[in-house]
Image (cartoon, coloured by chain):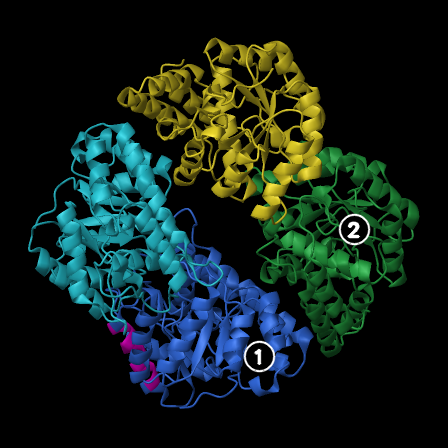
Chain colours: A cyan, B blue, C yellow, D green
Amino acid sequence: MTIPAPLTGVVPPVCTPLAPDGEVDVPSLLSLVDHLLEAGVHGLFVLGTSSEAAYLTDGQRELVVRAVTGHVGGRLPVLAGVIDMTTPRVREHVRAVTAAGADAVVATAPFYTRTHPAEIARHYRLLSAAAEVPVIAYDLPSGVHTKLPAEVMLELAADGVLAGLKDSSGDLAAFRDVLRGLRAHPDLAGFSALTGSELLVDSALAAGAHGAVPGLANVDPEGYVRLYQLCQAGDWTAARAEQERLCGLFGMVKVGDPGRMGGSSAALGAFKAALYLRGVIACPVTAEPQVGLSEGEVGEVGEFLAGAGLL
Amino acid sequence: MTIPAPLTGVVPPVCTPLAPDGEVDVPSLLSLVDHLLEAGVHGLFVLGTSSEAAYLTDGQRELVVRAVTGHVGGRLPVLAGVIDMTTPRVREHVRAVTAAGADAVVATAPFYTRTHPAEIARHYRLLSAAAEVPVIAYDLPSGVHTKLPAEVMLELAADGVLAGLKDSSGDLAAFRDVLRGLRAHPDLAGFSALTGSELLVDSALAAGAHGAVPGLANVDPEGYVRLYQLCQAGDWTAARAEQERLCGLFGMVKVGDPGRMGGSSAALGAFKAALYLRGVIACPVTAEPQVGLSEGEVGEVGEFLAGAGLL
Amino acid sequence: MTIPAPLTGVVPPVCTPLAPDGEVDVPSLLSLVDHLLEAGVHGLFVLGTSSEAAYLTDGQRELVVRAVTGHVGGRLPVLAGVIDMTTPRVREHVRAVTAAGADAVVATAPFYTRTHPAEIARHYRLLSAAAEVPVIAYDLPSGVHTKLPAEVMLELAADGVLAGLKDSSGDLAAFRDVLRGLRAHPDLAGFSALTGSELLVDSALAAGAHGAVPGLANVDPEGYVRLYQLCQAGDWTAARAEQERLCGLFGMVKVGDPGRMGGSSAALGAFKAALYLRGVIACPVTAEPQVGLSEGEVGEVGEFLAGAGLL
Amino acid sequence: MTIPAPLTGVVPPVCTPLAPDGEVDVPSLLSLVDHLLEAGVHGLFVLGTSSEAAYLTDGQRELVVRAVTGHVGGRLPVLAGVIDMTTPRVREHVRAVTAAGADAVVATAPFYTRTHPAEIARHYRLLSAAAEVPVIAYDLPSGVHTKLPAEVMLELAADGVLAGLKDSSGDLAAFRDVLRGLRAHPDLAGFSALTGSELLVDSALAAGAHGAVPGLANVDPEGYVRLYQLCQAGDWTAARAEQERLCGLFGMVKVGDPGRMGGSSAALGAFKAALYLRGVIACPVTAEPQVGLSEGEVGEVGEFLAGAGLL
């Protein structure tokens, strides 16, 4: 399907449920997709950071896209991440996820190498030239260790190279530079500006973003849909209350002991534990070499769910 | 072939010559291998950072390993990088390069994700369990944004998980912690401690390293072999002079205009320009989305070569 | 005077006009204070980062506080920065600025040293115990290279150690953790949560901040007062337009050539050039070793002013 | 006295013993100086990072310089740190320590502000113009968050602005750029290149450094003097053994629990605990807001001393 221009609303980065042996648990994945669709989300983003794309083999990635697009059947746009280091490798992922049915691709700046704004621009130009679907830029300095410059984003938007931006930088001031720039050019009205910061959705929407891609929406999609609707209605007071409830729930990403595991293990482990506790997926295991939450930590995740009325 | 334990001497990270269309130029690659062998290097490391492994597709990676191991025919050990983000993806590369004939694999810590020493250890344990060849750790904080902790390296050496360490951190004090730890345990005498810092080879060998993996050895392999031999002979004064000559030559990595390109473009572009000017490879192009050196910049690379008596 | 609890509104970090010889230009300083007061600001913050406090000698710092508090005469609260590396040195500044008439002090975490949350807490507890005026924490990771943790801020608020927080981190999600925590404890209603991010004032006020400390308010205090009033009135659409006008004006901090000067030179140079062009101060010079804007760059600052209707 | 050009040998950064009330314990300070002189050190560096200069008030700093220079009475050169944020403030420290008898001053790049190589050069030029004693640059990226560029150091050496460099960056490759540059210009033969990396003294001397400024030399000055002499004699094997013994002793900086304190507390606390246990100073307390070592941690420091034959 053709994705809306701009894409609006809540587009969760879909977690990838795994079996104990590390393989993709397709029934759980489809159960999760149903859980999201029933909540009224507006699109799906597979193979993102919250999907553990960095941990999935090429075969697993293809399986995920094929399973989800097949199940969704065009009811919603399905975006797919193409997370890899540089243009030639990302281009192969673009080919693979497009063949598997993705409606758009989401690509970061080059990483592992030491890059430059001119190279970032070149990267997106080459990807766009090769892609049969729209290309959305993914700003994730915590993983990529480079910030996508606002002026590069606007230049690539103006040239029709990029169809959108998912901003997961946490730097709202910089994101607003993009939003202001878009508003100043009416011909860019179809460019999708999406925030990936689950804690700032109301702020970003108030500033002009079109939608949100919050990892926590796996756990509480109804909450994010409600938040989006309140923002759409201009009820900023109620939106703030809903956002703050979700901020509280997000505290679950800190239950994993930082002396024993990294931040990805803690956050992804908490999301999966929550989905498991809510009965959405069959097994909360995360991919190797991540460290799992302890039984006590899973219990703490449960308390966050209970506190938010989700258990 | 079985790699020596420890592996000693000069083990260049072999550049990957490309044709103008971005495909691997196999004849140039084999010409480069011959150029290195004739200089008397002690091993080869393909698919490292200087090999632009981050830019090569899986098919190109396999082609490189197969071509080089086939050409070398066991005359020298061939190590292969398995550069990717996490255990499941790296494991696939281990399988592929081993099938293509690599004698050992070289793996970084997880990247893109936010990792932890416990996860780094787990990563290597899982790789080692799955690999049929020795696993060498690759410490590259500039690309991976994590430093491999000395105590983790020593623990994994003691447990037989790791066969060696390539230290490209530039942090000689930390590398010496590993070297001291190895010397304190005679049963670890087979562990290979290699420096990847082309500017510190004499210092690292004096401190007890077994060998070096210098990117600049593509350009001047004779120089590094001579440097290694001087260090072996304990002639530290002559070694310092040779090292400093090589430091001067290394200045070529700064000719690329930092206002126009990133550090990888500048460094890899200079190495390839030098190999092209020396007649070793047919084309100096680097992989996308890197920015090429200008004609004037290539001329400056030539001046570095001339200054070092290499043209 | 006793500062309001909480302190609300616009509290500009007052620039420190200098004479060509580097000494404080007191008449220009008082002219600037009048310029701010006439615009209706709600407090003044002297010796902050925008005041070039890092460049002022102890004698100059005292002169600034004495001049401003004397001139203001209690019409408005005057906060004073006590920017220094560690507790014993900051404590001396607390004594000095309090003796010179400051109504509150604003202190960062320790810097230059490698610190820890426990030491940050201890730092503020010791400062508070020694201070006769309220202590406000100053979160400035770009200068201090440590982020003040939200949980430490809330703990120190609850214990009566801190009277407020000036957040200049740009990390709105983290600042909202503080705002949520304050709202959850009605006894903390007097704690002042102020944003120092000139580009996010509407977002921060919508999220519950009490006021703003924007460096750009030196140049356009009327704009920030208007923005504050629109936020107070809940007119978020008009607030966003005003905020975006100010974001555009803020572009002046980038006219300084980054090949020739650092970010502080460019930003502080632009603010002072703007004040000079607007006729508020007699000389736009910045403190050593900053590099001054060129004539052409000053001209570009003028264009920003003209574009915003301020010339 | 006039400092040697170049200054050679071991120049310990002298710890500043404090009384329980935080005031400088002058008798202990002089006892420490005697301890160092008896070991045969070649100069003293007061008010450095290991001296807790960042924690000392201006009055305490003056007291330290006056006490030490008075006690030394010209037997050895006494260098004094002038650690502060920017030129005007550092200039005041230059005046103060010179008046108190320092033979040279040691200054970092500007910090807290966002600086630039051109501003760093300007900073040193202004300091040098104002100073009556030689100015030595201090490269400490871990504190200052900027690396002194080799080319700026060489330019300032050539112009007679700087008399030396204390390199505490840990980046031996970059330091060697300076050493090579000095050797290429015979007229710079008087420039002092000193390493501040206690773990790399043999490597740095082998590469051409003139001396070392190791914090650990407070604890074991005999060891560093012996190490220097072995390097002078070209006995690199014995030098390496001595260096490695000192590396082992340096392990004491990690006994402080990182969950409870920062790196400065742990390192300075260990040095002072060792001096206390060796009977050199009366009290191991560190300045506020540092966290002290526990009794058990002090015991571990003792084990390091015992292991090195120093108890």
Q: Which of C131 and C220 is in front in this view?
A: C131
Task: Quickly name the residue at label 2.
Answer: D45
What amino acid type is highlighted by mark number 1? Tyr
- Residue A49 can be seen in this image: no
Across the whole image, how many numbered discs are drawn on residues? 2
Looking at the image, residue B159 sits to the left or right of residue B107; the answer is right
Which chain letter matches label 2? D
Coordinates of residue B101 in the picture (x, y in percent): 33, 85
User: Which residue is drawn at the image coordinates 48% and 29% (left, top)?
Assistant: C187
Label disc, if present, on residue B44 of the rendered structure: none
**Residue B284 in view here:** yes
What x and y, as percent, mark residue D53?
73, 44
Q: Distance between the residues labelled 2 and 1?
A: 38 Å
Above-or-below relation of A105 to D59:
below
Q: What stretch is highlighted in magenta?
A: B59-69
In the depicted structure, whether residue B72 falls above or below residue C224: below
> Which residue is labeled 1 in the image?
B228
Which one is nearer the viewer's eye here, D250 or D261?
D261
Q: Where is residue B106 in the image (x, y as percent from the top left)?
A: 41, 75
> In the shown orientation, is residue C131 left or right of residue D232?
left
For label 2, the crowd category at 10 Å Cα-Cα, with few meaning under 14, some 14 to 19 and many 20 or more, is: many
Quarter of the image with the N terminus of chain C is top right
Q: Tell me if A244 is positioned left or right of D214 in this view.
A: left
Same subunit, labels 2 and 1: the answer reads no
Quadrant of the frame with the C terminus of chain C: top left
**Parent chain of label 1:** B
**How many C-alpha atoms fall within 10 Å of the one at disc 1: few (<14), some, or many (≥20)?**
many
**Kind of residue indicated by mark 2:** Phe
Residue drawn at (67%, 24%) of the image: C97
Decide: is A181 above or below C37. below
Q: Nearer the viewer, residue D263 or C267?
A: D263
